[in-house]
Amino acid sequence: MPAPFPDYIFQNALWTIAYTVVLLGLSVYGLHRYAIIYWFLKKPKHGVVPPSRFEQLPFVTIQLPVFNEYFVVERLLEAVARIDYPRDRLEIQLLDDSTDESFELARERIGELRKQGLDISHLHRTDRRGFKAGALEAGMAVARGEFIFILDADFVPQPDILHLLIHYFTEPRTGMVQARWGHLNARHSLLTRLQAMFLDGHLLLEQTARSRSGRFFNFNGTAGIWRRSCIEDAGGWQHDTLTEDLDLSYRAQLRGWRFVFLADVVVPAELPEDIDGFKSQQHRWTKGSIQTCLKLLPTIWRAAIPWPLKLEATIHLTSNFGYLLLVFLCLLILPQGQSQGGGFARTLLVDIPIFFATTVSIVIFYAAAQRHLYPQGWLKNMMLMPCLLGLAIGMSVNNARGVLEALFNKQSDFNRTPKRGEGGSSRAFVQYMPVRTLIPLIEGFFVLFFLVCLWDIVRRGAWTSVPFLLLFVGGFIYVAALSFAARRRNRRAASILASLAVAPSLLEKNAALFLIFLTVLLTGCATESRHRMVISAADQKMLVLRDGRPIRTYAVSTSKFGLGDSPGSFATPTGLLRVKKKIGHAAPRGAVFKSRILTGEVLPVDAPGRDPIVTRILWLEGLESRNRNAFHRYIYIHGTPEERNIGQPVSFGCIRMRSSDVVELFDTIGINTKVLITSNPLPASLLAATKTSPLEAAPSNPL
């Protein structure tokens, strides 16, 4: 029987040479990780403390660059408004390049903050020239501050953040002080947990090690303060790379400015919850770092600085070439496995040293970060290490694309990373969808390729290679599966929108806006809950969706006072909300609540003369300006004993349901499930596809 892989293809020594060269390249970066670990663990002679304190606090400008940040811009403004700093020494700039409704939302909130005495300006550009760097440059041209504190839209600074950072500038050659990023949503999913581990390694170990050892490190683009004169001395913000922060950092340090990294000052931020958002972010960072490398590396080697600094800067700026080497490694695994020769001597002299230089260095690197940050639970976190390695492998094609685009000078836009905020919905991943590519198809190819490799090594009995190859198979399966799932959800939503568009007679005059919201909800399963709810005041019905598919309708009752959200009113709010709290688990049907506490009384259905809240409570929180009062108005989805009136607008603002229906709903949906309340009717085509609630089909009581 002929061998499935002809020997004459693989016996050429060039396969082994190429494979070894790639591994040696990866080993250089692996050995560098050991250096980072050493510098991190080497305690400084004295702690990182300000050299002195300002007697009079300097003037600070806070810059908030945003672009279409509908779901987080209010949270950002509210957090910044809480910063404790003298009002006469503080200026806030919202650098807004938005092209969507977030502009109006921000303008409204800024107007409210101005009335509270905050010095805040709303600078809106329409051309996005230079993207984020251009916005920062335009803002600095009119800024009054001696120091510039920059925050991206998804960051939530603590009130004392400026006091924690500003006094390090009493050293006149300190040009930038960087805080460490935290993670608001690290526990949201496996993807966000792995991202948090990635960032903890970089933001804790690498930044701390470089700062302690006097080597160059970079501003992370946010959560840091710049001395204005440092920015100007270094040549200002420049737009010729996608990582303007890395570019400016190196130019400033080459001019002799000193940077400070504070690992113990943490500003939490949001991690991308969607694989496309994560890929977009990683592609931008990878491509931008190589652009900066090509731009500045010759200058670094010509600079009058010690050669260890030049070497460290070179490894730092070229580190993302590792993704390109990883792709080469993927392609060489099969032919290398078929090559002959080497035996024990090769294993001892080549394979084992390279294994310790690459794989072992990665494990120790992230173990050091986790142990420092989470001394009680770091071993549990390290159980995810195989997943972390697999994700890095799976992302290699996406990131290698960024390296190649930088090398071949392919220009691209600064693609923002979609953010959900505390109340965002899957709408963010339709309206703000990152650019699609053919990368998932290539990832799918590698899945098949490594399955063939796995079959080949099993056929040859090379069992020691199986765990290694399983990382490659698992990594590419995970990333490719998430990517294809995201595209499938979006195609399904688009097809539903198209089917609705051919039946306008089903909708009222202004139903187009409702369909847009509904289509967005149908893209759902990448968020906290797989379920979504749409409540129609016109139909007095609730539509429940799971993974974008209609599964159930319930009869409901909205307010007899109409729709709205004025404080003190009894109207039902409209727009996008979420389930903030669930109350009443395991309570019997008909159990009475008073101020959300069970009284112990249980009422039968249609108890005469009684209309309390019963059975279950789903407390809603508004996510838009038009329903922002909903939570404090105590707007619930709840059971009612007056089931005879379900299907008619008879409530005092809440959404009423039959007890059996609200129990079923309560047990189905989770915290953060999104709820869209609309005045429009539900499309008949979607209602026909759902399973009707059994009690809804029963004839209503004429009483």
Image (cartoon, rainbow, N blue to C red):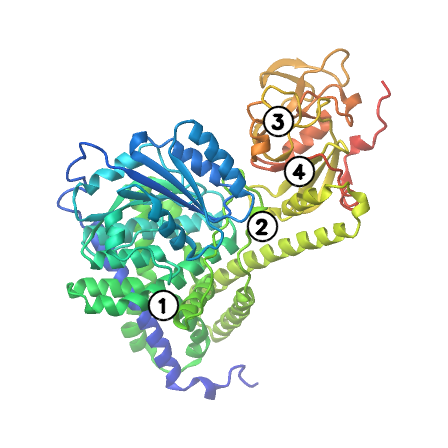
Of discs 2 and 4, which sits in the foreground? Answer: 2
Of discs 3 and 4, which sits in the foreground? Answer: 3
Inter-mark Cα distance, 2 to 1: 32 Å
Circle 2/circle 3 CB separation < 8 Å: no
Q: Amino acid at mark 2?
A: Gln
Q: Secondary structure at mark 3?
A: loop
Label of residue 565 in the image: 3
Q: Nearer the viewer, residue 685 or 572?
A: 572
Q: Could you tell me residue 293's position as x and y percent?
A: 31, 66
The residue that appears at 49% across and 39% down in the rendered structure is: 106
Q: Which of the marked residues, 1 or 3, is nearer the chain's N terminus?
A: 1
Q: Which of the marked residues, 2 or 4, is nearer the chain's N terminus?
A: 2
Q: Amino acid at mark 1?
A: Phe
Q: Point out the residue furthest to the bottom here.
A: 8
Q: Nearer the viewer, residue 511 or 213?
A: 511
Q: In the image, is residue 633 above or below residue 307?
A: above
Q: Is residue 363 left or right of residue 58?
A: right
Label 4 belongs to which residue?
533
Circle 2/circle 1 CB separation < 8 Å: no
Q: In the image, is residue 301 above or below residue 414?
A: below
Q: Is residue 568 left or right of residue 549?
A: left
Label 2 belongs to which residue?
431
Label 1 belongs to which residue?
321
